[in-house]
Image (cartoon, rainbow, N blue to C red):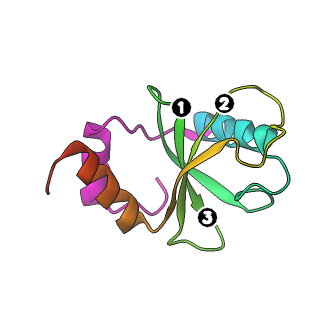
Amino acid sequence: MASIPPDRAATLQGWGWHYPDAASAQGLHAELQRELPPGHLLYGRPVETVAYREDQDDVLFQHKNEPDRFTVVHLTWTRKREINAEHPSVCFDGTFVDFFAGEEKFYGVKN
């Protein structure tokens, strides 16, 4: 599970995030690649699937060339390239610490 601190991994699971097995991670990455149009934040950037939410179609990706950078993308599941660089929509882009802080604020939980 990429670079998620072990003490945070269980907390994220409690908030609805799931950690994919290798096949699921590959499938989510493949869907991202199908959807990405030129000009999108992640277009042409090597990323790794870290976690996903089934209830929201959100996927957390870690940038391979910037290991402290994470991006949450809301996949559209159109199974084809989007025509607008704003889609699939980026819900978050930044450090894991900032991502976790945002989730913590949303769920109103302090660890």
Categorize mark 2 by other alpha carbons within 10 Å: few (<14), some (14-19), many (20+): some
CB within 8 Å, label 2 to label 1: yes
What amino acid is labelled 1 in the image? Asp
**Real-space Cα distance between discs 2 and 1?**
8 Å
Whole-percent x, y for residue 18 in the image: 41, 37
**Quarter of the image holding residue 88?**
top right
Q: Residue at x 72, y 61 (%)?
A: 46
The region drawn magenta spans: 1-22
Q: Quadrant of residue 63?
A: bottom right
Query: Distance between the Cα atoms at labels 3 and 2?
Result: 20 Å
Q: Residue at x 78, y 45 (%)?
A: 36
Image check: 75 left or right of 101?
Answer: right
The picture places residue 33, in percent across and down from the top left corner, at 77, 44
Q: Residues within 10 Å of mark 3 (few under 14, many from 20)?
A: some
User: Which mark sits nearer the N-terminus, 2 or 1?
Assistant: 1
Task: Please rate how many residues cluster around mark 1, counting C-alpha atoms within 10 Å: few if below 14, some from 14 to 19, many from 20.
Answer: some
Q: Quadrant of the C terminus?
A: bottom left
Secondary structure found at label 2: loop
Q: Position of residue 64 (x, y in %)?
A: 64, 67
The residue that label 3 is drawn on is 63
Identify the residue shown where x is 69% and y is 27%: 77
Residue located beneath label 2 in the image: 76
